Amino acid sequence: MPAYASNAAPSGPVIARQSGNLPTCAQRIVSLDDLSTEILVSLGMAPRAAANLDSYRRYVDLHADLLKDSQPLGSPQQPDLEALVRLQPDLIVGVSYLHAPLFDRLRRIAPTLLFQVSLTPGSPDGVDIGAAMLQTLGRMTGREDVARRVLASSAVAVRQARAAIAGKGLAGTPVVPFYPLSREGTFIVSNDQSMIAALMNRLDVTNPWRLASGHALHRRIGVRDIASRTDLTALFVGGQEGAPLFKTPLWQALPVALARRFAFLPHPYWTFGGPESVARLAGQVAEAVRAMPGAGR
């Protein structure tokens, strides 16, 4: 049985709701969302159960081998509460924007900790949230050393991406991650609080279309906007290199295409993630920038 101590309860801007009797060394933990699952497996912990298991394996896929015995809990929005009762976990972990309405029911099942994941400008962004979650759960599980190693590795990857951008002469220029809507011929940029935008904001580049909104996760950018920026470098997230848009004369006539200052980041997970997701994205950014024949010329 884990020890419980209310005076050991975590605090800070990333904590949204918490039970008063959180464990000091939790072992039987269940996760209600992909971000919490990533944090747990980054610490080397196999959650007793997890929501959204199939989606995690498909889109995040970090340390998915640790999930082979984890029980599925259904969707993050409607986790299987009856299964939670049967599992008798030491700790339930989730995020406020999905699970705040369930908090009272969850805390009656087991000690519950909900992290604050917010689009509010000025709140911890998508990089800081994951780091804080890792540190918090590292302390609560006796794995602080693991958390420090993961954070250090992530910081190295970010520095290497910044160096790759500087090495191509792109520091201080617009280097923007987009998700292309091929059928519409438009492009999505993500909120500043998202993981991909928060990462890019640490790489000494600019974004003419930054989105600082507490209510909108994305905004759409038209082809005319793209065409107006002759200095643009575009990074397309989600493995979209096969999209029909990029074979059209319209795309091929744009300055960014003519200069060959674009690349595709293969991984489809970029909205929110932990330090290992940040490191993976940073590595993809660095590799893509280094391979651009048109960059920095």
Image: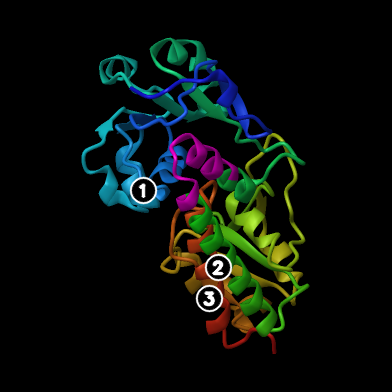
Question: What is the span of residues highlighted in magenta in the rendered image?
Answer: 132-146
**Residue type indicated by callout 2:** Ala
Disc with the residue nearer the chain's start (1 vs 3): 1
Q: Which residue is mark 3?
A: 288
Q: Nearer the viewer, residue 62 or 267?
A: 62
Q: State how far apart marks 3 and 2 are (Cα).
A: 14 Å
Q: Residue at x 42, y 50 (%)?
A: 42
Q: Main secondary structure of the magenta part?
A: helix
Q: Judge whether residue 123 is colored magenta.
A: no
Q: Is residue 190 above or below residue 288?
A: above
Residue 178, image x, y percentages? 59, 60
What SS does tag 2 mark? helix
Q: Residue at x 41, y 68 (%)?
A: 242
Which of discs 1 and 2 lies nearer the camera? The answer is 1
Q: Which residue is mark 2?
A: 157
Residue 223, image x, y percentages? 66, 63
The answer to whether mark 3 and mark 2 are in CB contact below 8 A is no
What SS does tag 1 mark? loop
**Residue type indicated by callout 1:** Gly
Which of discs 3 and 2 lies nearer the camera? The answer is 2
Quadrant containing the C terminus in the rendered view: bottom right
Q: Which residue is mark 1?
A: 44
The answer to whether residue 249 shows anywhere in this view is no
